[in-house]
Image (cartoon, rainbow, N blue to C red):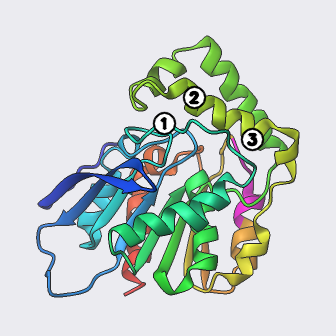
Amino acid sequence: MKVRPDKKYSKHHHYLTIHHRHLSAELIKPALIDSQIDLPSLVFLHEGLGSLAQWRDFPVCLSTMTGLPALVYDRLGYGNSDALNVPRTDRYLHDEALISLPDVLEKLNINDAILIGHSDGGSIALIFAATHGSKTRGVITEAAHVFVEDVTISGIRQAVELFNTTDLRNRLQQYHKGNADLMFCAWADTWLAPSFRNWNIEEFLPQITCPILAIQGEEDEYGTHAQIEKIITKVSGPSKALMIPNCGHIPHHQALEKVLNEMARFIRSLS
């Protein structure tokens, strides 16, 4: 099912300069926002093979449903942002949460955020919320990882096979302006490296005090329900788990209407 926004909005594209590198970003603003009222901003954080464009209409739909402004951006090495031309380390998600995301929010003067993170973006959101609690009103994760599972490694190996033997490479190329090979290999090589098998961010979870909505598809190719259980049982703030049947790794596409409604309900509860 394709859901489109039924309210007016404006959308502005920006290139943010962060440490001499350019990041592609979109700012979405529902038409009826009162500019005199300080509102939290929805901040969308894409997956490990994702981009601003791959969210499709989802950010606009959620922004207009909740009446809140939104930021969607391509991390370094993704989409229309500058290429990442240095090797990744096992702490690349930590670096995104502790260095890059704070710089992006500061650049845009966003001090009150509701983070919506998919897969890698969900892990980034959790680390940020743990370390920047005063700037985080709430967090929604989709298919976030807090540790590495066997199914994660199997899923990534299957993705590598698909990248090499199907049109996956060409499909990713249209979103990543010629950087699909570099982006994909950085992602796959990092997750498949023996040193990354011990990657774990559970230590951050007790530091999270804001409300959490953790979403995962029951048929997720990259993680089991153990991920969502760790999140909701270890965070210190109120939390809710949502397992979606007949859904894989991308709930906001594969169960679009349900995810939109559940996210909007959660976001309204934060005001």
Q: Which structural element holds mark 2? A: helix
Q: Which structural element holds mark 3? A: helix
Residue density around tag 2, few if under 14, some if 14–19, many if 20 or more, within 10 Å: some
Residue 62, image x, y percentages: 32, 62
Judging by the rendered image, the residue that carries numbered circle 2 is 182
Q: As displayed, is residue 89 above or below residue 110?
A: above
In front: mark 1 or mark 3? 1
Q: Earlier in the sequence, mark 2 or mark 1?
A: 1
Say if mark 1 contacts mark 3, CB within 8 Å.
no
Q: Residue at x 44, y 76 (%)?
A: 266
Judging by the rendered image, the residue that carries numbered circle 1 is 83
Q: Residue at x 47, y 18 (%)?
A: 170
Q: Earlier in the sequence, mark 2 or mark 3?
A: 2
In front: mark 2 or mark 1? 1
Residues rendered magenta in the picture: 222-228
The amino acid at mark 3 is Trp
| Quadrant where the N terminus is found in the figure | top left
On screen, residue 258 versus residue 169, left or right, reads left
On screen, residue 69 versus residue 244, left or right, reads left
Judging by the rendered image, the residue that carries numbered circle 3 is 191
| Spatial CA span between label 1 and label 3 | 19 Å
Q: Nearer the viewer, residue 183 or 265?
A: 183
Say if mark 2 contacts mark 1, CB within 8 Å.
yes
Residue 171, image x, y percentages: 45, 23
The amino acid at mark 2 is Leu
